[in-house]
Amino acid sequence: MPVVAIVGAGVIGMSWARLFAEAGWEVRVSDPRPDLAELVAEQLAGLPATAVADPAAAADGADFVQESGPERIELKHELFAALAANTGEDVVLASSSSSLLPSVIAEGNAAAGRIVIGHPFNPPQLMPLVEVVPGTETAPETVDRAVEVYRALGKLPIKLRKEVPGFVGNRLQKVFNDQAMYLVQQGVIAPEDLDELVKASLGLRWATIGPFESMHLGGGPDGMRHLVGHVGSQMTFEIGHPDREHLEDVFEDVERVYGTGAENYREHVEQRDRATRAILGALDSAGARK
Ligand SMILES: NC(=O)c1ccc[n+]([C@@H]2O[C@H](COP(=O)([O-])OP(=O)(O)OC[C@H]3O[C@@H](n4cnc5c(N)ncnc54)[C@H](O)[C@@H]3O)[C@@H](O)[C@H]2O)c1
């Protein structure tokens, strides 16, 4: 049975842990949190998973490492130094980081060739995408091996040609979320209405065809060329940016609509996961998923 070390047992790490364990990997979960053993026993009950607090010990003898610790560069440097020193020459050291460049994570690391970003969307257990982002020193074999492992887990790994801050998914998300906050701040729409608007239009569309295919179809038989020259020619207005210093009203609005607290969070996550599974199942039935 192959062994994976999951370093960081937060939202993302625990979801990776379940995914790997259900795919037949022996999982070692590492985290300094004092309740680690209870967390693993409770959330990964019946699966081949153990709690190993020390990351170096968790990585020792592992075939693959998926780091999902806090998004702080000094901590990632420290962790990757320990992971590099305690793994074999052919072991991929993947980071789930949402924004840190792989070249920066690998700075000064003797195993820079083995370091790569394997960025999931939350929750990794359900969301198909993993962005595989090489740094300037990442070896091509590292990228190939990471792609192979993620594919075997049932994920859709997409390789970026080069690193860029925020990678692709989060750059797109940033533009979109900034505009959503701006529109609420400007009093154009309420957060709950914006959410419904997106679910009933762009969300559904983008689950079936991406932005480029959508633009191409939107232009009719003449395709994207026609759309951009025709409807697109009027889309020249400035879109504005949210005032990040004054988001309190937006936070309060969102909390009023969706609530707060652990129990409320659990209920919302369950509903989200149920709906995500249903959509993935429907796309599978329609043969609309790679
Ligand atoms: N939350 C998301 O939506 C999301 C999505 C994709 C990627 N990511 C990335 O995944 C990583 C983890 O994010 P998260 O949301 O799970 O964070 P989180 O705060 O839920 O979990 C981080 C975990 O790391 C642990 N930790 C602290 N110090 C550590 C150390 N020295 N060694 C090992 N573990 C340590 C913490 O105890 C905590 O359990 C980040 O790099 C983040 O950018 C997050």
Image (spheres, helix red, strand yellow):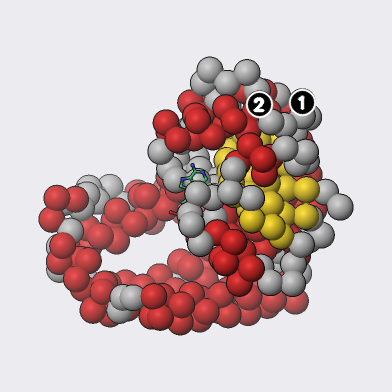
In this rendered view, identify the residue nearer to me: 284 or 119. Answer: 119
Q: Position of residue 76 (x, y in %)?
A: 49, 35
Q: Position of residue 39 (x, y in %)?
A: 56, 65
In this view, 10 is above or below 94: below
User: For the residues marked 2 and 1, what is the alpha-carbon distance in whole angstroms?
Assistant: 10 Å
How packed mark 2 is, by other alpha carbons closer than 10 Å (few <14, some 14-19, many 20 or more), is some
How packed mark 1 is, by other alpha carbons closer than 10 Å (few <14, some 14-19, many 20 or more), is few
Instruction: Name the residue that disc number 1 marks.
Output: 89
Q: Position of residue 33 (x, y in %)?
A: 48, 54
Q: Is residue 287 left or right of residue 108?
A: right
At a point 63% along the width and 75% down the height, the residue shown is 277
In this rendered view, identify the residue nearer to me: 15 or 41. Answer: 41
Q: Quadrant where the C terminus lies?
A: bottom right
In this rendered view, identify the residue nearer to me: 25 or 117. Answer: 25
The amino acid type, in three-letter code, at marker 2 is Ala
| Numbered disc 1: secondary structure | loop
The amino acid type, in three-letter code, at marker 1 is Glu
In this rendered view, identify the residue nearer to me: 274 or 184. Answer: 274
